[in-house]
Amino acid sequence: MPKVKNIVAALPEPEIIDIEALKNDIQEGCTDMVCVLGPTASGKTRYAVRLAEELGAEIISADSRQESRGMDIGTGKDIEEYGSVPYHLIDIAEPGTQYNVYRFQQDFRSAYEDIRARGAFPILCGGTGLYISAVTSDYNFRDRKPLSQEAPLPPLKTYFIGTLVSREERNRRIDARLDARLQEGMIQEIRSLLDKGVPAQSLISYGLEYKYVTLYLLGQLDYAAMREHLAIAIHQFAKRQMTWFRGMERSGVQIHWTEPSK
């Protein structure tokens, strides 16, 4: 039987974002919001912060795990990266809370309206495609999942910027960042959550770092197996993120992919 080649989809072509043109679009009311999206370890937070400094903007997080207090290292909040740039929808829920896309829609609406009411400009930044789609399109999730759409958001004129990095570089960054977080106290952070009474099953349901480190702390994985399984899971997660974003493009969303400077 002939071997079947593993065909890997080509990455999109990067472009240079014209910041002055973007500023003009914002001033003329052609753009309601910028969305900086990308897979994990692609540099989107750092890029969004630099862009916010250029535009005098504030950042709204679109990360499905960063809303929880006390879950810092494992979710990669990296609060210090924001500097003086105001941010929203981080640390707004207790750990173990079952946060969902409908609640995100409501919290996003509040943050967005607050930012615009103060004359500031919003940048949505994150890697959770479901959250991004839920607040930037009029897609009705009820058709596919039993999620409430009783108060849908009006479609926003959004300028999408995608942070692009090669698969090899992305995986290298993922591995290096994972080892750094393990050294920085991620295991101790998750042990502390368990000690505070957050159920192990709740932490496992968050997936990735919280799943595999919890299994390690429960004695179901040794350290080497935990680290190996976790690295593979994050690689696969990043691939799924890119699949979602390319799917957005196929549905008609224009994403301006760029390579953030190191």
Image (cartoon, rainbow, N blue to C red):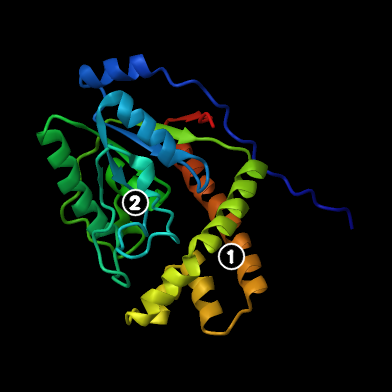
The residue mark sitting in front, 2 or 1, is 1
Describe residue 20's horizontal placement relative to residue 73 as left or right: left
Quadrant of the drawing holding the C terminus: top right
Instruction: Give me the C-alpha separation between circle 2 and circle 1.
Output: 23 Å
Residue 174 % position (x, y):
58, 51
* Residue in front for this viewpoint, 135 or 143: 135
Give, as a three-letter code, the residue at label 1. Leu
- Determine the secondary structure under disc 1: helix
Give the labeled residue for mark 2: 131
Query: Residue 64: image x %, image y %?
Result: 36, 57
Give 37 or 154, whichever is nearer the viewer: 37
Q: Are marks 2 and 1 in contact (CB under 8 Å)?
A: no
Location of residue 60 by image quarter: top left
Vertical position of residue 127 compared to residue 203: above or below: above
Report the residue that reaches farthest toward the bottom: 219
Element under label 2?
helix
Residue 12 bears which disc, if any? none
Image-quadrant location for residue 71: bottom left
Q: Nearer the viewer, residue 32 or 260?
A: 260
